[in-house]
Amino acid sequence: MTFHITVQPSGHQFSCEEDETVLAAAMRAGVGLPYGCKNGACSSCKGKVISGSVSHKAHQQRALTPEEEAQGYSLFCCATAHADLVIEAREVAGSGDFPIRKMPSRVATLDKVAPDVIILTLQLPANEKLQYRAGQYIEFMLRDGKRRSYSMATAPDRDEPISLHIRHMPGGLFTEQVFSTLKERDILRFEGPLGTFFVREDSDKPMVLLASGTGFAPIKAIVEHMIHAGSTRPMTLYWGGRRPQDLYMDALCRQWAAELPHFHYVPVVSNALAEDGWQGRDGFVHQAVIQDFPDLSGHQVYACGAPIVVDSAKHDFVQQCALPEDEFYADAFTTEADINKP
Ligand SMILES: Cc1cc2nc3c(=O)[nH]c(=O)nc-3n(C[C@H](O)[C@H](O)[C@H](O)COP(=O)(O)OP(=O)(O)OC[C@H]3O[C@@H](n4cnc5c(N)ncnc54)[C@H](O)[C@@H]3O)c2cc1C
């Protein structure tokens, strides 16, 4: 059975089969609903059902609480329609501009830049180019239908191979392979570009960029894109890690700060050891932002990395710093373990 979906306030319409999610149907139709993990864990796709009814597949209660569900909120990435729907969602201009494609790629290089971070570059088939927006990600298609997401760390404007920053998660299906058996010239199939974590270029508000660990990857692409576009929009990057070595491209960030008058960089380390000799800011990275920006009412925030950091930042920036909720843009690096939580 096919249902008819109308998005408010845009009035865009699309059809949705009974066995597909509202988000999948919107993406198929090129309607730009916001989304991140596509797995019911990050809440980027949360919106409201104004009329009609949906049911939700397995999702994390943290992403959509039973109270929110009772009030008509929905996670469109795991909602299937039971009737024609009118939904309320903030659409993302430009998210459907580039086709989502499946492609084979070859591992070009594997560089270990920290004890638990590898930078992997991909070679695409001859004459193929992946068009994407800085901040978007691809999904590797693994055996048994499993998928794993990684954000492009290179700005699309730069004619460079796609590079990904991959953090080792011990026992993890894909990253164990990356850190042990994967080698140059191996073939990886992926689908992309995906996601709506990219700069809203219709705004000139100052930007706070918040990265934890390899959450730096899409932020790097965003900064490079802004540099390439000649933007002078103020940007302050907070990059947090447990130890200084987690900030594996610290020198590049310091170089941006030295060369660009509108760019500032604040590295933050939460668990430095005495032997690290860390002299910089310490504590949780999002709390450093709160100390420096007690009023975020005129800013946009772009946050990426560990779900706990992204969630805490959103909550505290909105509650304590008057950040408008819809000026917080994020990709939380949710994992299989997050998705399997109740
Ligand atoms: C939009 C998006 C973009 C991302 N971009 C990046 C990126 O640029 N860089 C990056 O490093 N990561 C990124 N991630 C995270 C990435 O997709 C993977 O989730 C991560 O690399 C782990 O994959 P894995 O297969 O190695 O681990 P998984 O198999 O997913 O396991 C993750 C961890 O959980 C444990 N685990 C697995 N299953 C269970 C379970 N049932 N119960 C308890 N524990 C369990 C494993 O031992 C492991 O430690 C992104 C995620 C999203 C959603």
Image (tube, grey):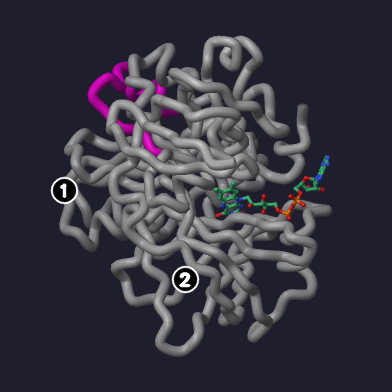
Residue drawn 23% across the image and 63% down it: 228
Mark 2 lies on a secondary structure that is: strand
Q: Amino acid at mark 2?
A: Ile
Q: Is residue 303 magenta?
A: yes
Q: Is residue 199 above or below residue 203?
A: below
**Residue 47 in the image: x percent, y percent?**
46, 26
**Residue 270 in the image: x percent, y percent?**
59, 34
Closer to the chain start, of discs 1 and 2, is: 2
Query: Residue 162 — which label?
Result: 2
Task: Tell me the magenta residue range.
Answer: 288-305
Relative to 111, is 292 on the left or the right?
Answer: left
Q: Is residue 268 above or below residue 50?
A: below
Give whichever of 109, 325 is nearer the camera.
325
Mark 1 lies on a secondary structure that is: loop
**Residue 78 in the image: x percent, y percent?**
62, 36
Residue at mark 1: 232
The answer to which quarter of the image holds residue 204 is: top left
Residue drawn 29% across the image and 27% down it: 9
Give whichever of 15, 264 is nearer the camera.
15
The answer to which quarter of the image holds residue 31 is: top left
Query: Residue 174 — which label?
Result: none
